[in-house]
Amino acid sequence: MIDILMIGPYPEWDLADLEARYRVHKLWEAVDRDGYIAERSENVRAIATRGELGASARLMSKLPRLEIVACYGVGTDAIDLEYARKRGIRVTNTPDVLTEDVADLGIGLALAVCREIPRADAYVREGNWRTSNMHLVTRFHGKKVGIVGMGRVGTALARRAVAFGCGISYFDIAPRTDLPYPFVADLVELARSSDFLIVTLSGGKKTKNSINSEVLHALGPDGFLINISRGSTVDEAALLEALENNTIKGAGLDVFCNEPNIDQRFLSLTNVVLQPHHASGTVETRKAMGQLVRENLAAHFSGRPLLTPVV
Ligand code: 8YV
């Protein structure tokens, strides 16, 4: 049997399937992680990881027989791709199958924060409706939406926002000639002309702190920030300050800098809606992601082409 090191848990249906085919080592259950890896280092030929957990060069360097890292997620920013490339280690991810769910949550967060759905829910539960009218909120339809990163998720989001009658413009490293929306080369300018700034960038060094204090000031006191990408794309200190001082009106966040131990200052803010990195977290999508991970591993170990190779 081939030995696989799993960095974090998968749903039980994936785990059962993997355990039927491979000898699975569950790193997340280990108390002494280094010792656990050392005991298995000579045998492990594959890593099965998750988007937010990745695989560092340090970890891969301890596994001399490692051939493939299969990521349960589209973002590979937490995997040291350069190291993998140098060692000839293959890397796969799970693109496409999660795009529509992530875009759904982007719109969901926009609606939740501007219509204040969680606060309105609490208002009803706490009995306040009987004694007063809830304060009025902000509409979403017809607003100007700036999309930061016009990849798969950005494009799916734009389609949804168009159906809400929103005007779309976007920022990316280059304009997309296949899309009808106006391209804005400067993020500050995009923020200034948007009511909602929705971030779908991939993570990593190149996009770190793209949404900084200047961008947040440009978004302004009536603007909302939605982040469904990676926590690292937003300067979190600047965001907390902007939310605390009402420099922007609100934020909907699925991702954070130090997940799951997020900055506790977020918890006392009423102008932010928080999600536990769950944009792809539907049964339907997670089943498709798990299947893709398993099919990539099976393809690799039977000498067939990988379905969704990154490296
Ligand atoms: C996570 C993600 O991978 O696709 C990505 O890049 O961040 C998510 O889908 C998911 O939470 C599974 O760990």
Image (spheres, rainbow, N blue to C red):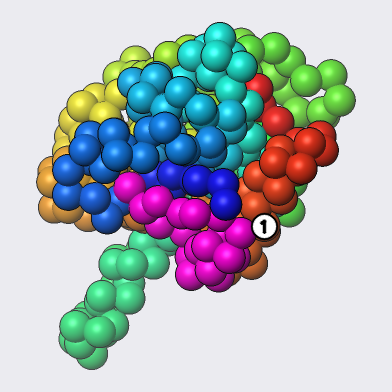
Q: Is residue 15 magenta?
A: yes
Question: At 53% from the left edge and 36% from the top edge, which residue is drawn?
Answer: 45
Relative to 121, 172 lies left or right: right
Label 1 sits on a secondary structure element that is helix
Residue name at image x 39 percent, y 20 percent: 61
Q: Of residues 311 and 51, which is closer to you in this image?
A: 311
From the image, tell me which residue sits under label 1. Answer: 291
Q: Quadrant of residue 290?
A: bottom right
Q: In this view of the protein, can residue 58 be seen by the observer?
A: yes
Q: What amino acid type should be assigned to the residue bearing mark 1?
A: Gln
Picture coordinates of residue 229, whole percent (x, y): 48, 36
- Above or below residue 14? Residue 187 is above
- The answer to whether one can see residue 232 in this image is no
Q: Horizontal and vertical percent for residue 228?
A: 48, 42
Foreground residue among 51 and 292: 292
Magenta-drawn stretch contains 285: no
Alpha-carbon neighbours of circle 1 within 10 Å: few (<14), some, or many (≥20)?
some
- Count up the numbered dots: 1
Residue 263 location (% of width, % of height):
17, 41
Q: Is residue 67 left or right of residue 209?
A: right
Location of residue 76 with respect to 105 vertically, above or below: above
- The stretch of residues the image draws in magenta is 9-27
Figure quadrant of the C terminus: top right
Q: Is residue 29 left or right of residue 279?
A: left
Q: Nearer the viewer, residue 13 or 42?
A: 42
Q: Percent from the top left, x then y, of residue 117? A: 39, 67
Q: Residue furthest bottom?
A: 130
Q: Residue at x 58, y 29 (%)?
A: 67
The residue lying furthest to the right in this view is 178
| In-front residue for pair 135/165 | 165
Q: Is residue 156 left or right of residue 263?
A: right
